[in-house]
Image (cartoon, grey):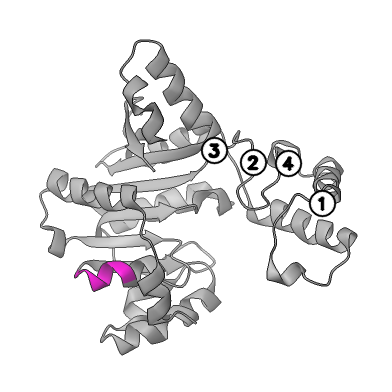
Amino acid sequence: MLTADDVARFQFSGHTLRFIKTAVKKIGVPLQSARILDYGCGRGMTVAKLREQGLEVYGADIDPQYIANGRPLLAERDSDPNDVLRVIDNHGSTGFPDGFFDIVISNQVLEHVEDLDIVAAELRRVMAPGAVALHVFPSKWRLIETHLFMPAVHWLPKSQWRKTAISLCLAIGVGPRWKELEGLSRNEVAEVLYRYSVGQTFYRRVRAIRNTFGSVGFDVRWLTPGRVGVLPFMNMPFVGNLLRFGLRHFWNVGVVLTRTEIAASVTESEQVCVV
């Protein structure tokens, strides 16, 4: 159950907040008036945190238990929990009206989406013309898989090869420390992690992501999450391009979407953002 203490301890992503403040200037909407959707909101931690700051933020998630765990706190804070937090249905609908949102954000969500076409179409439906979105997620070729904490297992086909790699990592003490794994044998843990990897993670090449969103009417730009230490090199010829390519393909991916009236041509321009 989401509690006030959970929200108080939560450290909101700095790059996402900077994006929101920049976005409202771009679209010409006052910050306090902008409607914001946290897509894949879980229990609604980010929703509750931003609502504390007076922002009009809503959340949607595919897991009804997460939504149920977040609604009581919002009810205590004089929000309509059924309106603010919504369950994404089996057809991918969030239930929000057409063109309702000015800004959409998600963090570590798109790698869990099996059918990206459905998500892209729904996001376009609920976003107003000119609305913008930021989605940050781990790249397909990131060395350490960010949920299992194992090297390169997600590079392998969803087959016995991947399951064997997971077992080998467990044998040398590498892997997650999930509470639900306590008391299980190594083989049982390997089975649980393999099933999670197969059923809950869907890594894609950046080109596939770009084409999917571009095909339904989004202008697509890359926001390269960077580290403070590499920022001085970003404007250097060749070196900057190499660093941007490496961060986008082997670290985190940040995709910025602008909803257009018609299917947009995809651009390759990008910016650097510190995370």
* First of labels 2, 3 by sequence position: 3
Depth check, mark 1 against mark 4: the one in front is 1
Name the residue type under label 2. Answer: Ile
Check disc 3 and report its element: helix, strand or loop.
loop
Depth check, mark 3 against mark 1: the one in front is 1
Magenta segment main secondary structure: helix
Q: State the residue lying farthest toward the front.
A: 229
Q: State the residue lying farthest toward the top.
A: 237
Q: Which residue is mark 1?
A: 170
Check disc 4 and report its element: helix, strand or loop.
helix
Give the residues in magenta. 49-54
- The CA distance from mark 3 to mark 1 is 23 Å
Q: Which mark is residue 144?
A: 2
* First of labels 3, 1 by sequence position: 3
Please report contact status of discs 2 and 3: CB closer than 8 Å, yes or no.
Answer: no
Work out whether residue 211 or residue 11 is closer to the camera in this orientation and state it: 11
* First of labels 2, 1 by sequence position: 2
Residue at the spot x=63%, y=53% of the render? 147
Q: Position of residue 196 (x, y in %)?
A: 71, 58
- The CA distance from mark 3 to mark 4 is 13 Å
Depth check, mark 2 against mark 3: the one in front is 2
Q: Is residue 33 left or right of residue 250?
A: left
Q: Which residue is mark 4?
A: 153
Q: Which residue is mark 3?
A: 139
